[in-house]
Amino acid sequence: MKVIVLGAGIIGISTAYFLAKKGYEVVVIEKNSSCALGCSYANGGQLSYADINPLSSHNFLLPMLKAAIKPNSYLTIKDFNLDFLKWSREFFKNSSAPLFKANSLNLFFLSLKSKNALTKLLESETEIKFGYKEKGILHFFRNQKLFDEAIKQAEFRRSLGIRVEILRKEECVKKEPTLVSLYDQKKLLGGIFYPEDASGDSALFAKELEKICREKYAVVIKYDCDIKNIFTNYQKITGINTNKGVFIADKYVYALGAYSKRLLQGIQINSGIYPIKGYSLSIPANKEFLAPNLSLTDEENCLVYSRLNNIFRVAGTFEINNLKTNKNQSHINFLKQSVKSTFSDFGNLYEAKEWFGFRPFRANFIPLICQVKKYGNLYINSGHGHQGWTLAAASAEIITNLIAGQESEELKFLSAEEKFLYK
Ligand SMILES: Cc1cc2nc3c(=O)[nH]c(=O)nc-3n(C[C@H](O)[C@H](O)[C@H](O)COP(=O)(O)OP(=O)(O)OC[C@H]3O[C@@H](n4cnc5c(N)ncnc54)[C@H](O)[C@@H]3O)c2cc1C
């Protein structure tokens, strides 16, 4: 059976791998000339399995509103079109305590599955090198209210079986000595360490896995191939129309991330995915610059830090401006300012590579990993928001199982998301 995967980001490439490994004939279609050049290119690198809280949370609403009106913060809102307003309404709905808890539990199942799926993948593809570090992630705090709330959430996670360590400020510095600068400034209150979390370069991983897909599993990747529209006969998908002709298969997996929502709209499907731009800096980490070794999360500024081989990456910020591709310098400045105020050594910050990508966000933060029943042979694997790298392996495994007609009971909540597609 032949399957076409639309998009060669971390989700598309992982999907191609799992499908091909299960024996499907796979073709991937990608508009760029290489894989992982979209949102998967220079993200924060965190495999944050313990981070099961959707951002749509009653506790996060007030800090978010404050951030939105404050100049030079991690959040700017510039788009007030109907799409975004509808998305925001759903976001607020999902912030209620019961929905927040239900969504967190669902993300927990996915996270757990993803860690296992990536571990299995790395056991069979031992040659993949992507700066993988299984050393945990340390969340640090300067704000007592945030810290107290995060401790409550950490206790909930502990009750699910996630390993958690609540650390005093001295213990944080012991784990990651570069936090001494914050400690000396008397700004560090403490931290929460998730030892089972990890980090790695998602673009490098995608490139290595793409090579394995082609060389070991005969996956065909069509680059520079821009999808123009999706053909249907109203009962199933009949082809993918591109600048290089029409491609036909038995089944199709949509993995276009935040892009090309219009392609789904063209076949009367509403993915409910809204693009939220985020920025990153990649600072060269060399002998002169002792970058942090441990992956870190700065909860107050909603930023993550990861050392990925010879790069120290800082990533985060949220710019709500649809798919506008202009660079907002205030977000870059926010990242630079945060690095400077957190660490005493920040390397050659002014040589950092600046980047932005569009996170594919759904309002309830549950990715779409489902069959589109209206068309039968169409599947969606998209909408992973700020967690696409973390959830890629499970998402790819689950969609492959769905295509093979296998659905597990505990993941039925994913198929339930299908009902939102026709709104
Ligand atoms: C600043 C920032 C930091 C982040 N940090 C983390 C992190 O630490 N951990 C984590 O888990 N996640 C993180 N994320 C989120 C993560 O990067 C995304 O969820 C993930 O990359 C989404 O992958 P994707 O494959 O769905 O999308 P993409 O990587 O965007 O892939 C979609 C692909 O579809 C292609 N495409 C689009 N339209 C067409 C068309 N018409 N024809 C052909 N091809 C097309 C694109 O070119 C692209 O290659 C971060 C994101 C950002 C922006």
Image (spheres, rainbow, N blue to C red):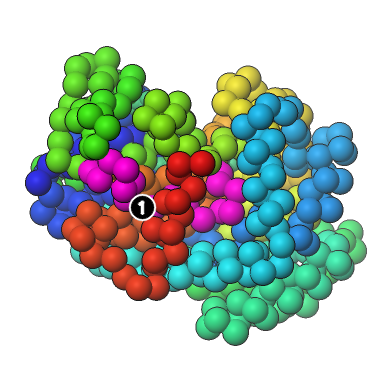
Q: On screen, 201 above or below 85?
A: below
Q: On screen, 324 above or below 253?
A: above
Q: Quadrant of residue 56?
A: bottom right
Residue under the image location 19 percent in, 21 percent down? 246
Task: Using the rendered image of the protein, determine whether residue 347 is visible from the camera's viewpoint.
Answer: no
Q: Quadrant of residue 322?
A: top right
Left or right: residue 183 versus residue 156 is right
* Main SS class of the magenta portion in the image: loop
Residue under the image location 40 percent in, 26 percent down? 266
Report the residue that reaches farthest toward the right: 186
Place of residue 368 in the rendered image (x, y in percent of width and height, measured from the top left): 43, 50
First to last magenta residue range = 361-377
376 in magenta: yes
Place of residue 312 in the rendered image (x, y in percent of width and height, measured from the top left): 57, 46
Q: Give the residue pinned by disc 1.
A: 370
Task: Using the rendered image of the protein, determine whether residue 338 is visible from the camera's viewpoint.
Answer: yes
Q: What is the crowding at mark 1: few (fewer than 14 residues within 10 Å), some, or many (at least 20)?
A: many
Left or right: residue 321 versus residue 200 is right
Residue under the image location 19 percent in, 30 percent down? 238
251 in magenta: no
Place of residue 134 in the rendered image (x, y in percent of width and height, measured from the top left): 46, 67
Place of residue 101 in the rendered image (x, y in percent of width and height, measured from the top left): 63, 70
Q: Report helix, strand or loop for mark 1.
A: strand
In this view, the residue in front, 257 or 354, is 257
